[in-house]
Image: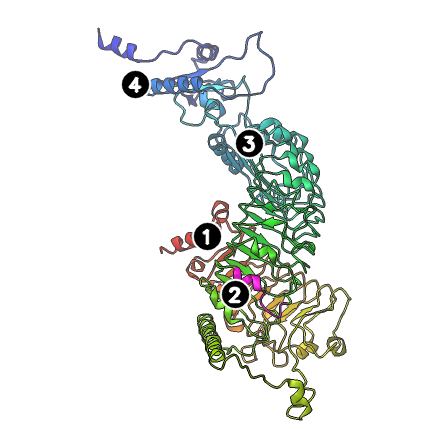
Amino acid sequence: MSIRQQKRSSTVQPRPTKASLMRQQSQQASSSSPSPNPISPPSNALRVQSATTTRKSSTTSRAQASEGVRAFMASKRAAAAAAAHQKKEVFTERTADPRNRVMTGAGRYTFSADDTLDEDVKKPNLKLQTVIAQAKSTGRLNISNRELRTIPDEVWTMYHVDPNKVVVDFNSSGDAWYDTTELTKFMATDNIISELDERIGHEFGALTLIDIRNNQLHTLPSSLSQLQQLTALYLSHNRFETIPESVFDLPKLRDLDLSHNRVQTIPPEIRRLSLLEILNLEDNNLRQVPDEIGQLTKLRKLYLSHNHVIELPTVEALNGWQKLQELHLSKNQMRTLFRSSTSTVVTLPLLVRLDVRQNSMSTLVDGKDKCPVALPELKELLMAYNQLSEQTNFDVLKSAPSIQTLDISSNLFADIPETVLELHELVRLDVSSNHLRTLRPDIAKLEHLAVINWEGNPLRSIPRNMTMVELIQSLREKLVLEVEGKEKKADEKREIGGLVTTQESPSSLEKEGCIPAEVPEPARATGTLDLSGQKLTEIEQDSLIQSNKLPATLQLHHNLLSEIPNTLNVFAATLVHLNLEHNRLVSVSLTSDTLVFSSLKTLSLANNRISSIMATPEATLSFPRLVELNINNNQLRNLPEELKTYLPSLRTLRANSNHIEKISAKTLENLAVIDLAFNDIAYLPPEIGRITTISEFMVYGNIFRIPRQSVLDQGTHAILEFLRRRLGD
């Protein structure tokens, strides 16, 4: 065989097509005046012909290639690539008029900046097109933070294929229609979308996750019920007033987040979500919880905090919660925790965390002598900021022998309940801001106890500079001495034959004039003074002095105050908690020469108009012992860099929903809980990762792009680790 025959046999010869015949006619007609613009047709391009008369005439259709088609196309590509490698000659063709040229293959859809074939066609949004192209191969579409009012049509038609324009090019390295992957995750957070198109159920039937947080949605399309594979639906920070009916038609839904909306009721249809594992309805307007919620037998976590819930269903209705691990009910209006209609004891075998802080509870069980619920695996019980006292029935603690963390701070306890001493696994006990005058030495019997918080009580037997370790050690030493003293007295009684001398009663001493008949009791911080919701523009000193007892907590929320009143100096030395939420404060000063709150632990200034935090270096610190500062929902644009200097005891900073644009690592030093979510922070300093005291760090809802949302979703540890890696640590 000759060399010419070998070359001919090694070259792939495409079959004649209509396009090639038209080119040949054009060449013959313009052979005398060749065009100056050569066009090289793709050597191995094959245009798929449109359907025959038996095929439908519609111009668009959705296509999803089978595995066999994909394998066939891959083999053809490989063969074409091998043939192209062996070619030795390059052929060029010229046409007389660019407007009469006919192209096949990928060149048919490639237009340069100088191309005049389609001058009126608007150039596509390359950024959005790039995201869509990536989604076709990964099955994950993320169009978050684009200020979108609606979902673009390019998204809804991303899988549409025009059969008259399908081109199969074995030499093309780009993605083809037969290589697409069905969309499984759809994210459009942080936009201003007010309505979701019905096409979401028709076009993306394989979706397993939808995340449309932080938009302006108030309803969902009925076609959502067609997404039978959906397992996660995130709709927080929108404008829903009811749970959309289409949600209850999602049989595989496992995670539903409708927090930070305006939902008023939970309909009985909630029972249809039989596979639901996580339900988040925090920060809504709920007042009642239906019995049907107890039929969610797969439920693991239930979040109902920041609502107006008065009571839970009876424990008999909650018997289906056999897999429940976390129950969050803080900041509601509950007056009792568990209610029962029978004498049956219901067991919640896997419940680990129960949070009922900031309610109005004075009882834990509705008057029953026997606790109607058993919590064998409960590890953390949080009951701070209620109205509990030593008269409260604490039998619920007897049904929870595994408790390791117990928070009963900011209540009305004058003594630690006896049932607390039966929690032999207890590690952390918080009794701060109560009415305790002494700490019982028998607390030292709890051998695992490592942390006791006692601040804010009128204790006189504990030195101010005593550390926690020293306190626990002193209690154990005191317990040993008491035991030895009792044994010694018992021995003395046995020696004298049971004779016991008695001491003179105080009344007899009074009669003899040894002590005065009336000894005035020194004033101490106790109870709560509530002046909230009275539209006060200033506080008169007479309204504060209601008795000779000084309040530990002062409620001044929902008034018209424009500054922290100077008349509060009456309580400045003893006040522990001060609530000034929902007023008209425009600024706050961390220093003062006239008003110093020397015992204040928590200060809440949320929902005001605060735009600045001021401090004078030479002045006295206003809050030297402040532990928690809440300035959520204000108008702050920055935080003092020397925050540690002016608030040396601060551990919790909540500055959610402000306009903070810049944050410094120095500002956050020594803090443990930091909430800076929903601000305008554009950059997160990597030095924050080196602050070892941080245990909770919330920065979602800001405008920075790094770290990505996937890192934020993993929590505090992942965020700090990411920042440390950026520093090379």
Residue wearing tag 1: 719
In which quadrant of the rendered view does residue 592 lie?
A: bottom right
Residue wearing tag 3: 207
Q: Is residue 353 left or right of residue 367?
A: left
Indicate the position of residue 255 as horizontal and vertical percent values.
Answer: 57, 40
What is the secondary structure assignment of the residue under circle 1?
A: helix
Instruction: Answer above or below: position of 409 versus 570.
Output: above
Q: Residues within 10 Å of mark 3 (few under 14, many from 20)?
A: many
Q: CA distance from mark 4 to mark 2?
A: 73 Å
Does residue 419 belong to the magenta stretch?
yes
Instruction: Answer above or below: position of 289 versus 499.
Output: above
**Do the numbered discs 4 and 1 sit on residues whose CB atoms are within 8 Å?**
no
Q: Is residue 69 left or right of residue 201?
A: left
Q: Amino acid at mark 3?
A: Leu
Indicate the position of residue 464 as horizontal and vertical percent values.
Answer: 51, 78
What is the secondary structure assignment of the residue under circle 3?
A: loop
Q: Nearer the viewer, mark 4 or mark 2?
A: 2
Q: Amino acid at mark 4?
A: Lys
Residue wearing tag 4: 87
Q: Nearer the viewer, residue 277 or 15?
A: 277
Q: Residues within 10 Å of mark 1 (few under 14, many from 20)?
A: many
- Tag 1 or tag 4, which sits nearer the N-term? 4
Q: Nearer the viewer, mark 3 or mark 2?
A: 2
